Amino acid sequence: MSSLSAPQAPKKRRSYSKAFKARIVTASQQPGASVSRVALDHGLNANLVRRWIKIAEDRPSTTSAFVPVPLSAPQPSPVYSLPARDSIRIQIPRATGTVTVEWPADHAGPCLALLRELLA
């Protein structure tokens, strides 16, 4: 007896979306995760998952390593002025308003000591 066999169509390669690959790579990089376990859970070969991980590590990251941190508005630096010959005027911007300090010019030493103390 002879048996006839029809030629079988070649198997097509499976393809996976980038989002699926990224999900698998992320899952296998979690603390305590096993690449083999993740691959088995998704019906994949562990070597294929390892290849995806290597490709992901070799590819430059498209996400920033920096995390934006909300900051309060920067405080403007104090404005120093000499409005008259006999006094020192210092304006310090604050969130609630400007603080103005006027000091006699002939007592500049104690004014400087006060500023050093405030700004230290």
Image (cartoon, grey):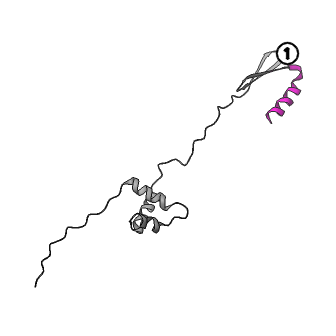
Residue at left offset 25%, top offset 66%: 11
Front one among 98 and 29: 29
Q: Which amino acid type is marked by label 1?
A: Asp
Front in this rendered view, residue 91 or 69:
69
Quadrant in the rendering for residue 2 = bottom left
Residue on which disc 1 sits = 86
Count the labels in the image. 1
Residue 26 location (% of width, % of height)? 48, 57
Relative to 120, residue 88 above or below: above
Neighbour tally class for label 1: few under 14, some 14-19, many 20 plus, Cα within 10 Å = few
Left or right: residue 16 versus residue 102 is left
Location of residue 63 in the rendering, given as x and y in whole percent from the top left corner: 49, 48
Query: Of all residues shown, which one is farthest toward the bottom?
Result: 1
Q: Residue at x 40, y 63 (%)?
A: 42
Residue closest to the eye, 59 or 1: 1
Q: Position of residue 83 (x, y in %)?
A: 78, 15
Residue 118 magenta-highlighted:
yes
Q: Quadrant of the C terminus?
A: top right
Residue 29 part of the magenta segment? no
Q: In this picture, which residue range is highlighted in magenta?
A: 101-120
Question: In the image, is residue 107 above or below residue 46?
Answer: above
Residue that protrudes farthest toward the top in the picture: 84
Secondary structure at numbered mark 1: loop
Give the main secondary structure of the magenta stretch.
helix
* Residue depicted at 12% across the width and 77% down the height: 4
Which residue of the protein is positioned furthest toward the left in this rendering? 1
Q: Quadrant of the N terminus?
A: bottom left
In this picture, residue 109 sits left or right of residue 48 = right
Q: Residue at x 19, y 70 (%)?
A: 8
Place residue 81 in its image quadrant. top right
